[in-house]
Amino acid sequence: MSLATGRAKLVETSKTLTAHWEAVRDGWGDQACQEYEEEHVAPIAPQVATAIRAMDRLTVVLAQMRQECG
């Protein structure tokens, strides 16, 4: 799997997770739901964003490496 493919899958999966969580949250909506969101769901978005930024930086580095070594 290429880095671009992995990045695209990560972005799409993150969107899917968000959509599914919103559907579950709408039906759940109590204190346990809020705690679950704070402890398990909310930390995911910043982690995904960090991973995507790292993948973007790595893409640039790999392209430079290919250019210099090609």
Image (tube, rainbow, N blue to C red):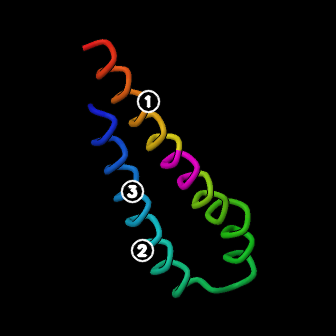
Side (left or right) of 7 relative to 47: left
Extreme-front residue of the structure = 68
From the top left corner, tell me how far across and down residue 32 is, in percent: 72, 75
Side (left or right) of 40 relative to 68: right
How far, Cα to Cα, is label 3 from label 1?
21 Å
Instruction: Specify the amino acid type for callout 2.
Output: Ala
Viewer-closest of 47 and 56: 56
User: Which residue is depicted at the point 69% across and 67% down?
Assistant: 36
- Give the labeled residue for mark 3: 11
Q: Is residue 16 above or below residue 10?
A: below
- Give the labeled residue for mark 2: 19
Main SS, magenta region, reads helix
The magenta segment is: 48-53
Q: Quadrant of residue 43?
A: bottom right
User: Which residue is depicted at the point 45% across and 34% down?
Assistant: 58
Q: Nearer the viewer, mark 3 or mark 1?
A: 1
The quadrant of the image that shows the C terminus is: top left
Q: Is residue 8 magenta?
A: no
Instruction: Specify the amino acid type for callout 3.
Output: Val
Q: Secondary structure at mark 3?
A: helix
From the top left corner, tell me how far across and down residue 1 is, in percent: 26, 31
Q: Is residue 61 above or below residue 35?
A: above
From the top left corner, tell me how far across and down residue 37 is, in percent: 66, 70
Q: Secondary structure at mark 2?
A: helix
Q: Secondary structure at mark 1?
A: helix
Neighbour class for label 2 at 10 Å: few (<14), some, many (≥20)? few
Q: Is residue 27 above or below residue 21?
A: below
